[in-house]
């Protein structure tokens, strides 16, 4: 059974904790979900939300409410109940009935759960899909002689009788499809379901297959549910692969906290400008579904970390609050980390004046932000520092790049960490985890994801191999260790075999392709190499035209991502001009159109890996992929990973020149081992050196590369370096060690 304790530790009803523990014990073997004060169904007053709701395959849906004090009298046709201390409470029975009716109405909208012709629910034995129970822990059996108005209730003898009541709710066997629908409705995630379109049994086009794969009921898995539907009483970290639902989870968490805490001021901050509309839409949809009203955007701020001329960002917001003129991107252009530069500057001027103004801060794309940003977040957040940050570890190749709280959140005046590493270890008193890992990938077909990991981590490359070093890191991301089974941490020359089981890849496109189409799942992701860039671009143009004209793919569901940043604009112009001549329109965010524009209706998107982050599409093209081979900084491996993982359908990787031939060898090796990876762990010197490179900032690496290129291009300087190395044994030995000689 899954437990969703919410904030039961803060409950003012002493019996709730007791009965919560009783239910945990009685139901621990059942296949169900037990939640505290979940869902709210849009009720702002927590007293109007029943104490517990239980969803079970065996017993259906049961709502349980706990009366907080002894009741001695009922008045006004049982509308008001008189407590032993003389006070009155509104009828809990009326409240529970209204709550159950709201759930029933929601369930009746599902064709999988309700037969509109007969007026019967399909998953229960009677016409009551939601059972209710009221427990009076302070009242004895003789107190309610005439209580027919309450359908089901228990007195202080509940420890004995509660199990009997639950067993009496035994219902029909509820199938998994019905359970998915029930969960989706109770969670409120049904609002994210795709509009169903009629699709023929014989799926003839790629578009048919992709749409069919996306028509799954949108429901949270157990880990996602735990993260999204609970409010921690302090900081929380969320880790996950691309496509594990981090943005949706944070959006739901923001909306639910906003609904249930009218006095809270909440901040949602992110990095990729094109995600702004997506995040606001997620929050708005969920808030309207749960509360029947739009969010109050004055209390719930959705801000890009920096901001721009047209949209306020966190940095510009804070500068405005504290009377500073915000620095521009142009001013920060030469800095190794522009975010570190602007937030460090802000802290140096205003650190002592900062007042906490937010009750909760949610950070998406946390891997993109430096310590100065996190330290600023710490100071603007009220106690108990409800800071929830989510990041995709693979965007930086390896989790070792991700800093711990003590590194991120700065220090106090005495040099002590503002946030200790222990602050995200274990659980809060109510059972909410402080650190979550999301293993299930929903966006990418399994083969697409393995291509991304294999190429991003360089598992089949001799000069770019940076695998995860410990067993837990692989398993937490949805892989199983086949070999070696007896090691928790891998070492030089260990032969590693890992497999990604189908159960952790929730995108069912591969299965649909093999069962219902003329296509092969082997072709979901393909690589082609060309002699010249013109041949490559012409091939991409031809394929896009075919997909639109023959496979009925909507232009906005096609994204072209280039790994060649220096030539991206000219290559995009070539593609755009040629496609326009065939009547296919395009957008190039950040080059021609606004940076926050992405997937505009009726237009193909041409973009870079950086601007594509946080977005997804049915069809993704990755051009100039050979750049990942020649890049010593390993950054292009990151970019290749990000680009591939934007695809929830087909992915076409192309490259040109000799390096594209080398890339093909890696891809062939990935294909050969699929769905496994098989490789030897690199030498300690190689691994350490690559981790050093990964940990360096982009700007710093760029400067160092330029210095090296200058040295290598000048004979005298190169000769001097060789002589210095030969004349300095220490330098010579360092070079030998780094080169693994």
Image: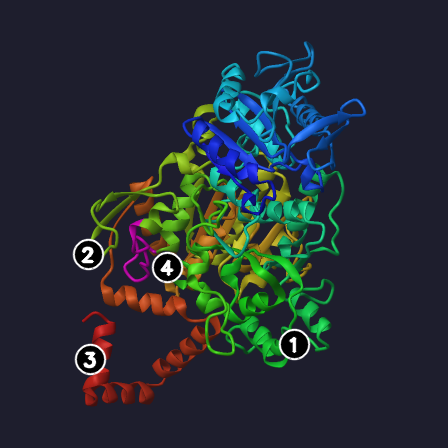
Of tags 1 and 2, the one toward the viewer is: 1
Q: Is residue 467 magenta?
A: yes
Task: Describe residue 214's horizontal placement relative to residue 264 as left or right.
Answer: left
Camera-side mark, 3 or 1 = 1
Q: Main secondary structure of the magenta part?
A: loop
- Examine the rendering and report whether any part of residue 588 can be seen: no
Marks 3 and 1 close (CB-CB < 8 Å): no
- Of pointers 4 and 2, the one earlier in the residue sequence: 2
Instruction: Residue at 41% x, 47% y: name it.
Output: 527
* Lower sequence index among marks 3 and 4: 4
Residue annotated with mark 3? 733
What is the quadrant of the C terminus in the image?
bottom left
Position in image of residue 604 (x %, y %): 62, 48
Residue 302 shown left or right of residue 405 in the figure:
right
Residue 353, labelled with which disc? 1
For numbered disc 2, what is the local secondary structure?
A: loop
Q: Which labelled disc corresponds to residue 659?
A: 4
**Which residue is label 2 attached to?**
493
Residue at x-position 66% and y-position 60%: 303
């Amino acid at each position: 059974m899954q437990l969703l304790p919410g904030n039961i530790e803060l409950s003012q009803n002493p019996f709730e904790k007791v009965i919560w523990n009783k239910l945990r014990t009685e139901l621990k073997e059942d296949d169900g979900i037990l939640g505290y004060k979940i869902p709210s169904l849009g009720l702002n007053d927590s007293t109007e939300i029943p104490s517990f709701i239980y969803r079970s395959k065996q017993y259906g849906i049961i709502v349980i409410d706990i009366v907080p004090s002894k009741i001695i009298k009922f008045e006004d046709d049982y509308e008001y109940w008189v407590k032993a201390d003389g006070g009155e409470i509104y009828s809990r029975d009326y409240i529970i009935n209204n709550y159950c009716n709201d759930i029933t109405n929601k369930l009746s909208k599902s064709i999988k759960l309700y037969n509109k012709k007969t007026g019967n629910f399909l998953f229960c034995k009677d016409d009551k899909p939601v059972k209710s129970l009221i427990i009076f822990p302070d009242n004895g059996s003789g107190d309610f002689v005439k209580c027919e108005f309450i359908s089901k209730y228990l007195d202080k003898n509940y420890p004995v009788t509660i199990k009997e009541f639950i067993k009496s709710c035994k219902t029909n066997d509820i199938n998994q499809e019905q359970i998915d629908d029930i969960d989706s409705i109770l969670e409120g995630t049904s609002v994210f379901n795709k509009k169903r379109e009629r699709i023929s049994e014989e799926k003839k086009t790629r578009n048919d297959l992709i749409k069919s794969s996306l028509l799954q009921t949108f429901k949270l898995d157990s880990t996602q549910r735990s993260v999204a539907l609970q409010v921690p009483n302090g900081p929380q970290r969320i880790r996950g692969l691309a496509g594990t639902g981090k943005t949706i989870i944070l959006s739901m968490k923001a909306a639910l906290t906003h609904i249930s805490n009218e006095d809270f001021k909440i901040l949602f901050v992110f990095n990729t400008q094109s995600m702004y509309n997506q995040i606001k839409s997620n929050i708005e949809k969920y808030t309207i579904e749960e509360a029947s009203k739009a969010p109050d955007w004055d209390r719930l701020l959705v801000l890009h970390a920096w901001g721009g001329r047209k949209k306020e960002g966190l940095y510009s917001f804070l500068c405005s609050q504290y009377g500073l003129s915000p620095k521009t991107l142009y001013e920060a252009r030469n800095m190794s980390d522009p975010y570190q530069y602007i937030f460090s500057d802000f802290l140096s001027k205003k650190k002592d004046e900062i007042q906490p103004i937010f009750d909760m801060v949610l950070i998406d794309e946390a891997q993109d932000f430096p310590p100065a940003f996190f330290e600023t977040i710490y100071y603007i957040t009220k106690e108990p520092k409800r800071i929830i940050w989510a990041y995709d570890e693979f965007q930086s190749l390896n989790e070792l790049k991700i800093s711990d709280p003590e590194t991120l959140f700065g220090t106090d005046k005495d040099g002590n960490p503002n946030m200790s590493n222990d602050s995200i270890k274990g659980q809060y008193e109510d059972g909410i985890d402080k650190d979550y890992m999301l293993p299930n990938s929903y966006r990418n077909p399994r083969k697409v994801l393995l291509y991304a990991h294999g190429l991003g981590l360089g598992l089949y490359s001799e000069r770019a191999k940076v695998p995860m070093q410990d067993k837990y890191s692989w398993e937490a991301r949805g892989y199983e260790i086949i070999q070696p089974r007896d090691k928790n941490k891998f070492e030089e020359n260990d032969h590693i075999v890992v497999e990604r089981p189908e159960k952790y890849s929730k995108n069912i496109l591969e299965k649909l392709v093999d069962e219902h189409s003329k296509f092969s799942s082997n072709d979901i992701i393909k690589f082609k190499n060309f002699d010249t860039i013109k041949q490559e671009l012409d091939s991409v143009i031809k394929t896009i035209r075919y997909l639109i004209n023959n496979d009925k793919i909507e232009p906005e569901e096609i994204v072209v991502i280039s790994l060649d940043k220096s030539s991206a604009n000219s290559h995009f112009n070539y593609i755009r001009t040629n496609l326009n001549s065939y009547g296919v329109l395009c957008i190039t965010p950040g080059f021609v159109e606004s940076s926050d524009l992405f997937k505009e209706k009726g237009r193909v998107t041409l973009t870079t890996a950086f601007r594509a982050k946080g977005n997804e599409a049915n069809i993704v093209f990755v051009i100039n992929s050979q750049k990942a081979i020649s890049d010593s900084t390993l950054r292009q491996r990151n970019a290749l990973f990000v680009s591939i993982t934007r695809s929830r359908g087909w992915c076409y990787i192309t490259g040109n020149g000799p390096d594209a031939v080398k890339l093909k060898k890696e891809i062939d090796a990935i294909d050969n081992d699929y769905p496994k990876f098989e490789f030897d762990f690199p030498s300690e010197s190689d691994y350490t050196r690559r981790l050093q490179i990964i940990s360096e900032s982009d700007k710093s690496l760029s400067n160092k590369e330029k210095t090296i290129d200058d040295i290598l291009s000048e004979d005298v300087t190169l000769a001097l370096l060789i002589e210095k190395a030969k004349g300095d044994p220490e330098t010579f030995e360092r070079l030998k060690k780094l080169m693994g000689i």
